[in-house]
Image (spheres, helix red, strand yellow):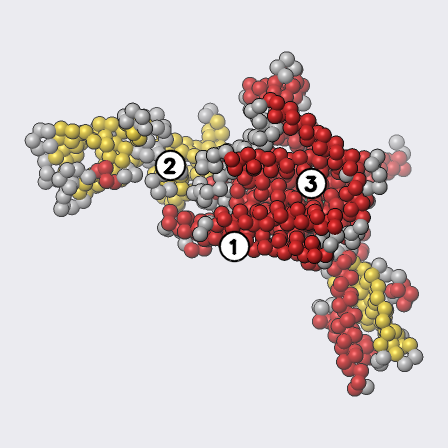
């Protein structure tokens, strides 16, 4: 059986879990919370199965075309971290894994509503960007253990940063007192944009399934709305999304009231934000920057070339370094550092996808 | 200027460079300005960026914006005086700040821990209290055992009616931050050494040829003090496809006329000799096939296989058959056009090489056929004779990246230090614990106090565990007393 069916099941489970987690915030019913967690665990098991299956398939694929390659080498070369699709899947897997650990450690489910949307966004993106899902042969530059560990550790780091983003968002929502605060404007608009993109990708996804799926559809990202061929649709999308963001801004303060009734304390959210960054920062430094540089050096003899992908990783690193210093030695507290944690993850998303989508990528993933 | 004023100026300058505010400012500046260079293409032809700027600012404004950007150094931003200036400031900041704070940290590490009054313990950041029905020494032993079991090195202070156990762990973890900062400085040093004493060049070496220099640009050779030769270059493909699987060259180093090293290099597996590294970077076709050779395995039906190397236009005979062949054409990538059915070459690169051979049979009959390297079946002649197109040689060159970077050792060292430093910094904390055990009528009164420089919640759990372990042990011993 193909692994893709399990991937589809897990993606569905995560999206359903997201909806249930949000419902849990509103109704605060224990049973609803348990269902959300169960759904997430189910998705996680399905996804783990799919990852292993894909690994096995890749292994046979690699071993048959590289008969001189040993068992361990084949296993490493076949690790499902070889292109944009697989790395996104792995990102979601690690994000959910860390989320489940936190949920059990802190015995609190409320964070689910902030973390599962990140997973949903990534999963929808896979389907609507037209990222190739097939197992592809590995071109020579990508046949490197350094690259493998680079990708593995960076994505674990990104997942930790994703959790810190969720916790920091919950934090600033919780501490907001009134609609006139600048932070309120910041988070309500941010959530507005976030949800707009989520919904727009959902529309892409629905319109995609009626379009011809057999053919390789590349770059469907936001094609049904903002990047539509019809000018009317584009204008309408903008108007609707601005109205939507405005509505979130107008009614968003309600979210604060919803959160206020939960056992989420600001100290706990701050602690989760910091802990995830404390885990993510070393992983990202070692995996993202150092191993990336070593890989580049072993492949091309240049460890740093200031290409956009590298530079954006560095920017991300600067932002998190800023977070650590502002918080521990600069005396920054509360909202300001939470905003830094949020900005950090926006930089992560840009490093990860923006460079390929917006700036033409020179990086290997650019073709994905 | 008086001595005092000089001192003041020195002090305020020092303070400025030691401040974390400056670090925060520089991090913000570096992060935001770096963005520009990811949008404007670096070291590109002006036309490219003009086009980009027209998209962003409109056609009329673009040239003006371009000029302003060029003046600001945005077109080669990461090497511009101001960006480098910020990096220099950043490292000065880092160094001075670390020097400024180091003595205090060193003192924190080395000041011996002292016993505290019970009241001081009761007001520590992390604290716990309990009373047990036990003897003073019993309680002491059990706390001592529990602490020792968690690898604490415990000191004791005894007074008339009380005993205090005090201990600390992980104090050297406080140095980890300095290791991280030092590693950043080492990276800067490594980069500077690389720029000053290293080079990045290239060398395109045709199969069978050798060279005693690499090139920075076509007009700037860098002499090597040895000779490098390319025996052969080869691209391997995934079965029957045009997706490359491996780029390989066999490289030989020759010194004083002697072969001293030979290696097949691949992407991600370079050759290093005398501090100079040769990377498999690319490959290409020579403009002429004049020096090329085609290697064919010729096997008459039922006969012995023999190998020939032929130039373009060269002829051979299939032994014992009287069939003659002449190479009359060559294609780097042969395919049949999907619509017209005609044969054509679809790539300039050696993707799917083929040779056309004109055969002359003993009876004078002539015909021409294509033999493809990828499909050996194309070389089976009527009559069962086989011509296998094994390889071609002397038509391609291997593209080598040639780099010398003595600074790389600093980078590697710094990487290891940074990894270790970050790990220790985030996951090992400096914890201090005081346990005061005092006689209180018939029972003992325990006060535990502790402090940690990070991971407070984890530490609180540790203290809880300490108390509950010791409590279990004390209560377990209670009946025997
Ligand atoms: C991007 C470069 C830098 C990195 C990666 C870095 C890394 C770190 C890390 C990981 C910590 C520990 C933070 C924590 O306690 O959670 C730290 C602390 C610190 N950093 Fe940096 N740092 C950088 C640049 C700087 C600069 C330029 C300064 C200059 C003022 C500085 C000053 C400090 C100080 C004063 C501390 C606190 C040390 C202490 O706890 O005693 N850092 N740094």
Asked if badge 2 and badge 1 are on a common chain, one would say no
Q: Mark 3 falls within which chain?
A: A
> Quick one: label 2, few (<14), some, or many (20+) residues within 10 Å?
few
Residue that lies at the very extreme toward the bottom in this rendered image? B480
**B3 or B391: nearer the eye?**
B391
Q: Residue at label 2? A: B242
> What's the CA distance linking mark 2 and mark 1?
32 Å
- Quadrant for ligand 1 reads top right
Which of labels 2 and 1 is toward the front?
1
Residue drawn 39% across the image and 45% down it: B263
> What's the CA distance linking mark 3 and mark 1?
32 Å
Residue drawn 72% across the image and 30% down it: A243
> Quick one: label 3, few (<14), some, or many (20+) residues within 10 Å?
many
Which mark, residue A344? 3
The picture places residue B463, in percent across and down from the top left corner, at 78, 65
Q: Mark 2 falls within which chain?
A: B
Residue drawn 14% across the image and 43% down it: B301
Q: Residue at label 1? A: A49
Q: Give the side of residue B453 with respect to residue A103, left or right.
A: right
Q: Is mark 2 within 8 Å of ligand 1?
A: no
The picture places residue B88, in percent across and down from the top left corner, at 70, 35
Where the C terminus of chain B falls, by quadrant?
A: bottom right
- Residue B98 appearing in the image: no
Q: Give the side of residue A235 with respect to residue B273, left or right.
A: right
SS at badge 2: loop
**B23 or B218: nearer the eye?**
B23
> What's the CA distance linking mark 3 and mark 2?
41 Å
The picture places residue B403, in percent across and down from the top left corner, at 50, 37
**Dot placed on the residue nearer the N-terminal end, 3 or 1:** 1
């Amino acid at each position: 059986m193909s692994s893709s069916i399990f991937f589809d099941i897990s993606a569905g489970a995560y999206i359903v879990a997201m909806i249930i987690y949000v419902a849990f915030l509103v109704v605060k019913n224990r049973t609803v919370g348990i269902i959300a967690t169960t759904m997430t665990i189910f998705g996680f098991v399905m996804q783990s199965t799919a990852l292993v299956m894909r690994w096995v398939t890749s292994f046979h694929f690699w071993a048959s075309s590289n008969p001189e390659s040993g068992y361990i080498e084949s296993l490493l070369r076949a690790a499902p971290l070889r292109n944009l699709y697989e790395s996104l899947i792995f990102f979601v897997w690690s994000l959910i894994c860390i989320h489940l650990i936190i949920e059990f450690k802190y015995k609190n489910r409320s964070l689910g509503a902030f973390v599962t949307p990140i997973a949903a966004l990534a999963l929808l993106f896979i389907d609507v960007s037209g990222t190739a899902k097939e197992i592809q042969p590995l071109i020579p530059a990508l046949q490197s253990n350094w690259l493998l560990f680079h990708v593995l550790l960076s994505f674990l780091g990104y997942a930790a940063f994703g959790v810190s983003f969720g916790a920091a968002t919950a934090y600033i929502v919780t501490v907001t007192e009134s609609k006139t605060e600048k932070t309120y404007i910041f988070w309500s608009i941010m959530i507005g944009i976030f949800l707009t993109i989520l919904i727009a990708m959902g529309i892409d996804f629905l319109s995609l399934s009626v379009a011809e799926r057999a053919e390789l559809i590349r770059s469907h990202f936001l094609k049904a709305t903002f990047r539509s061929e019809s000018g009317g649709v584009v204008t309408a999308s903008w108007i609707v999304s601005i109205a939507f963001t405005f509505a979130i801004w107008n009614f968003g303060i309600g979210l604060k009231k919803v959160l206020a009734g939960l056992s989420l304390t600001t100290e706990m959210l701050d602690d989760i934000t910091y802990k995830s960054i404390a885990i993510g920062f070393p992983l990202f430094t070692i995996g993202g920057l150092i191993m990336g540089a070593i890989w580049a050096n072993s492949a091309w003899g240049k460890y740093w070339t200031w290409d956009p992908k590298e530079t954006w990783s560095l920017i991300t690193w600067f932002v998190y370094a800023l977070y650590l210093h502002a918080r521990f030695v600069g005396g920054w507290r509360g909202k300001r550092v939470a905003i830094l944690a949020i900005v950090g993850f926006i930089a992560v998303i840009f490093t990860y996808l923006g460079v390929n989508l917006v700036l033409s990528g020179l990086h290997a993933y650019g073709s994905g | 200027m008086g001595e005092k004023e000089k001192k003041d100026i020195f002090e305020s300058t020092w303070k400025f460079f030691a401040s974390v505010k400056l670090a925060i400012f520089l991090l913000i500046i570096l992060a935001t300005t770096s963005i520009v260079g990811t949008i404007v293409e670096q070291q590109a032809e002006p036309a490219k960026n003009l086009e980009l700027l027209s998209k962003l600012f409109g056609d009329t404004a673009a040239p003006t914006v371009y000029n302003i950007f060029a003046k600001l150094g945005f077109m080669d931003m990461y090497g511009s005086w101001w960006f480098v200036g910020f990096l220099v400031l950043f490292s000065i900041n880092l160094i001075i700040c670390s020097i400024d704070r180091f003595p205090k940290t060193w003192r924190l590490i080395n000041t011996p821990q002292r016993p505290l009054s019970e009241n001081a313990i009761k007001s520590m950041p992390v604290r716990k209290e309990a009373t047990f029905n036990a003897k003073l020494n019993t309680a002491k032993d059990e706390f001592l055992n529990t602490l020792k079991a968690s690898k604490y090195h415990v000191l004791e202070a005894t007074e008339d009616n009380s005993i205090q156990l005090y201990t600390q762990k992980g104090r050297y973890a406080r140095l980890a931050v300095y290791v991280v900062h030092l590693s950043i400085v080492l990276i800067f040093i490594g980069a500077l050494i690389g720029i000053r004493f290293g080079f990045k060049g290239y060398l395109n070496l045709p199969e069978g040829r050798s060279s005693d220099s690499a090139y920075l640009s076509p007009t700037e050779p860098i002499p090597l003090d040895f000779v490098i030769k390319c025996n052969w270059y080869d691209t391997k493909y995934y079965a029957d496809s045009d997706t490359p699987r491996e780029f390989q060259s066999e490289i030989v180093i020759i010194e004083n006329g002697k072969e001293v090293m030979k290696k097949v290099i691949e992407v991600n597996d370079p050759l290093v000799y005398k501090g100079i590294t040769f990377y498999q970077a690319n490959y290409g076709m020579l403009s002429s096939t004049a020096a090329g050779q085609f290697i064919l395995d010729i096997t008459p039906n039922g006969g012995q296989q023999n190998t020939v190397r032929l130039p373009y236009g060269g002829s051979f005979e299939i032994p014992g058959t009287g069939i003659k062949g002449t190479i009359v054409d060559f294609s780097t990538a042969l395919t049949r056009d999907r619509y017209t059915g005609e044969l054509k070459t679809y790539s300039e690169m050696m993707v799917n090489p083929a040779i056309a051979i004109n055969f002359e049979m003993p009876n004078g009959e002539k015909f021409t056929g294509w033999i493809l390297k990828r499909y050996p079946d194309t070389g089976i002649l009527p009559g069962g004779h086989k011509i296998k197109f094994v390889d071609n040689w002397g038509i391609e060159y291997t593209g080598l990246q040639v780099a010398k970077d003595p600074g790389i050792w600093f980078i590697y060292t710094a990487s290891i230090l940074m990894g270790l430093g970050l790990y220790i910094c985030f996951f090992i904390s400096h914890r201090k614990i005081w346990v005061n055990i005092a006689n209180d009528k018939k029972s003992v009164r325990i006060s535990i106090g502790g402090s940690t420089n990070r991971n407070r919640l984890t530490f609180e759990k540790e203290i809880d565990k300490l108390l509950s372990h010791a409590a279990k042990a004390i209560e377990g011993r209670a009946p025997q007393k």
